[in-house]
Image (cartoon, grey):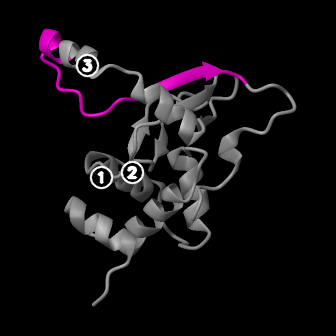
Amino acid sequence: MVRDRTESLFAAAGLRCTRQRKAVYEALAGSCDHPTADELHRSVVREHAGMSLATVYNTLEAICRAGMARKLAGAGANGSARYDAGRTEHLHLRCRTTGDVADAPADLSEQVVATVPREVLDQIEQRTGFKIHQLNIELIGEYRAARTPPGARRRPGA
């Protein structure tokens, strides 16, 4: 039996790939706007009638624990968490007015991440005893009125 990409990701993470989990993950992976659980629920319930909001929350928690996505705590306009299936280190742009979160352009993200000295991260680990697994940089501001946030576009290939 040939597995698709999503099923392979779940298998590699040691998670069961149920129909509902697959739908939630694929909706998240196909989005650039870092949706909240409520937004994801509204998106997937169209195709999977009867999927509960609790299922979406539980799936998001499971895939975040497994490293398939990350939770951006308190980023929503009402303080709700947003989720990102992007697994590479990159910059986020958060609008302080709306709480919307988008990815900075990949080439610029790479430039900024590359300038963070590994020696500094090593020193932080040594001084604090805290093992760093991921670097997350968030730029907070707001869009000019006539500008469409980058998150309004879909992820390439989605």
Measure the alpha-carbon separation of dots 1 and 3.
Answer: 28 Å
The label number, if any, that marks residue 138 in the structure image: none
Question: Which quadrant of the figure has residue 133?
Answer: top left
Q: Where does label 1 land, which residue?
A: 62
* 56 or 93: nearer the viewer: 93
Dot 1, how many residues are within 10 Å of its Cα: few (below 14), some (14-19), or many (20+)? some
- Part of the protein shown in magenta: 125-142
Q: Amino acid at mark 3?
A: Leu
**Position in image of residue 112 (x %, y %):** 48, 26
Task: Farthest residue to the top: give it.
Answer: 127
Question: Which quadrant of the figure has residue 135?
Answer: top left
Q: Where does label 3 land, which residue?
A: 121
Where disc 3 sits, the SS reads helix
Where disc 2 sits, the SS reads helix
Tell me the quarter of the image containing the C terminus: bottom right
Q: Amino acid at mark 2?
A: Leu
Q: Residue at x 17, y 20 (%)?
A: 130
Measure the alpha-carbon separation of dots 2 and 1.
Answer: 5 Å
